[in-house]
Image: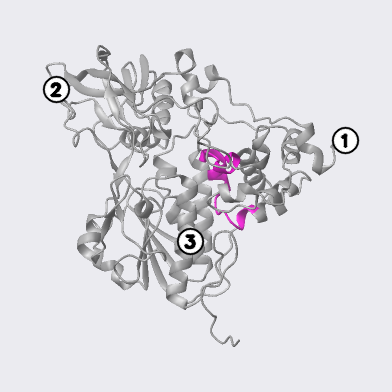
Amino acid sequence: MLPDKSRGFMTFARTLAPNRPVAERVRNFEEFAQSLSPEALKKQAYRCMNCGVPFCHSGCPLGNMIPDFNDYAKDDAWRAALEILHSTNNFPEFTGRVCPAPCESACVLGIIDPPVTIEMLEREIADQGWSKGYIEPQPPARRTGKRVAVVGSGPSGLAAAQQLNRAGHEVVVYERSDRPGGLLTYGIPNFKLDKRIVARRVKQLEDEGVVFRCGSEVGKNVPVAELEGYDAVLIAIGSTRPRTFESMNVPGWNLNGIHPAMDFLTQQTRRLLGKPVEGPEILATGKKVVVIGGGDTGSDCVGTSIRQGCVSILNLELFPKPPEQRAENNPWPQWDFVLRTSSSHLEAPGGDCREWCVNTKAFEDDGKGNVCAIQTVKVDWSEPDASGRRTMTEIPGSERRIECDLVLLAMGFTQPEADCFVKGLGVELEKNRFGQAIKADAGYQTTHPGVFACGDARRGQSLVVWAIHEGREAARAVDLYLMGYSDLPAANGFVYDSVQPGYSA
C-alpha cells in the first residue's frame, strides 16, 4: 500500500535505476542504463512533493511541468504523463538520457534530502509512450502555404522543424551528414543514446510531413542562393569548430595522433551503423590514450576508448576538482557545481582516470611525425576576483612527461561553421564566452531579414535541453514573422505576442 502523495518523500529514498555491470557493458556499445520495476518507479514519483512553488520549473530550460507528470506517473497514467511532458518537450527520451538534469538541482526536496529522480522518470514516461504506442505522427490539420528551410538537424533543428510543421508550414531540413540527428546521431555515443531512438523520432517527423535533405551542405553542394526561395530560413547548425592547441602555440599541436574528440566519436558511430569511415582512421585499440578536457565529450571519449580496447586511459582537466558538496557561494536552487563521475569514468581502472589542474605544455614527436608523449605541468588557481576571473599559476617542480600515442581533444567548441551564411546572406557573428556565434536579436532573427538562428549556433556550445528550448522558441518566432501571430506555445506558458487577425478588443 503506497502512502498518501503528500508523505511519499518522507517514506521512500531516492533510488536510481542500476546501470549494466561494468564488465558486461564495456564489451559492447549497447545502452548502459536499465529501468526500475513499475512499482519502484511509482515510489520515485511519490517522492515529488507537488510544491506550491515548484522551483524545478525554473531549473529546466524547457519549463517542464514536472510535478504534473510525476502525479500521473505515480498512478500508472503514462499517456496523461506523456501528454504533459510533450507539451513542453518534443523529445523527452533524449533529455531523459543525456541531460545533466538542472531541474534536480532546483528541486525543493533537494534542500534537505536527495532530490526527486526527475530525469529517470522523464525517460521512463517517454519509453512507456513508445512501447505502448502512444506516440504517433501528428500532421497539421491545414497548411499555410509558407515554406521554411531549417539548416541543421541536431536537437534544435529537429525541435524547430517539428513545431513549424505542426504550425502548418512546409518544412525542408538541410543536413550535411548522411542521416539526420546532428550530434544526437554522430556526437553522442550509442551506449548513452541508442541511434534507433533518434531514428524513430526522425521517422515521426517524416510521417508528419517534414522533408529531410541529407548529404546537403549549404555553401558547398547546395548554393546559399537556394535558401532565398523560402519564406524564412532557420540556421541550426550547432557550434562545431573545435578548440585546439593551434591558437595557443603549443609545440607539436599538429602531430599525427592528435585529433578532435568529435572526429573520433563520429567514426565509431559510423562503424556501428555500417557506414564507411571518413578521413584517416582513429582507433584507440592497443593504444595509450590521453583525453584532454573533462566535460561530457571527454567522458564519452573515455568510454569509447575503453570499449575499443585501449592499453591505458588518462583524462586531463585544466581546472580544479569540484567539491563533493555545494560550496557556500553555490546555494540552492542554483546548479550544484559538485564533483560528478560519469559511467565512463567508472569503467576506467580504479573507477576513475581523471587528473585535475594539469596544463599541456608540448607534444613530443617520435621522429616520424607521430605524437609519443605529452609534457605537462600542474597548476594552481587563485580565488575569483571581483569579475569572477581566476588566475592560473604553474607549480614549480610539477613537470611531467606522459607517454601516449593517441590524444583526443575535448576542450569544447569555439563557433559555428557559418562562413557561407556570413558571405552569402550577410549574417553577422558576435563574440561570446566561447568564441563567436551568429548574431540574433531577442526574437532569434539575424541581421538578415527573414533569416533566424537558434541552438548552439546562436548561444554557443550548450546542453541538448537548451538546444531543444531554442528550437521551440525560434520556431515560434518564425511563425510570428510569417503569420503575424502564433499558436505555438512559448516557454513556461502560452503567450500571444500579437493580436490574431479578426480579433477586436
Q: Residues within 10 Å of mark 1 (few under 14, many from 20)?
A: few
Residue 71, percent across and down? Answer: 74, 48
Q: Earlier in the sequence, mark 1 or mark 3?
A: 1
Dot 3: element: helix
State the residue position of label 2.
Answer: 369
Q: Residue at x 55, y 72 (%)?
A: 496
**Do residues under tags 1 and 2 come within 8 Å of each other at their CB atoms?**
no
Left-right relation of 415 to 132 = left
- Judge by depth and name the residue closer to the eye, 491 or 270: 491
Above or below residue 269? Residue 180 is: below
Q: Earlier in the sequence, mark 1 or mark 2?
A: 1
Left-right relation of 410 to 159 = left
Q: Residue at x 69, y 47 (%)?
A: 132
Residue 109 visible in this rendered orientation of the protein: yes
- In the rendered image, residue 93 lying in the magenta stretch gets the answer yes
- Judge by depth and name the residue closer to the eye, 499 or 284: 499
The residue mark sitting in front, 3 or 2, is 3
State the residue position of label 3.
Answer: 473
Q: Earlier in the sequence, mark 3 or mark 2?
A: 2
Numbered mark located on residue 1 in the image: 1
Alpha carbons under labels 3 and 2: distance apart? 48 Å
Q: Residue at x 39, y 39 (%)?
A: 187
Please give the range of residues in magenta.
85-105
- The amino acid type found where label 3 is placed reads Glu
Q: Residue at x 77, y 45 (%)?
A: 76
Residue 58, percent across and down? Answer: 58, 50
Left-right relation of 43 to 449 = right
Most frequent secondary structure within the magenta stretch: helix
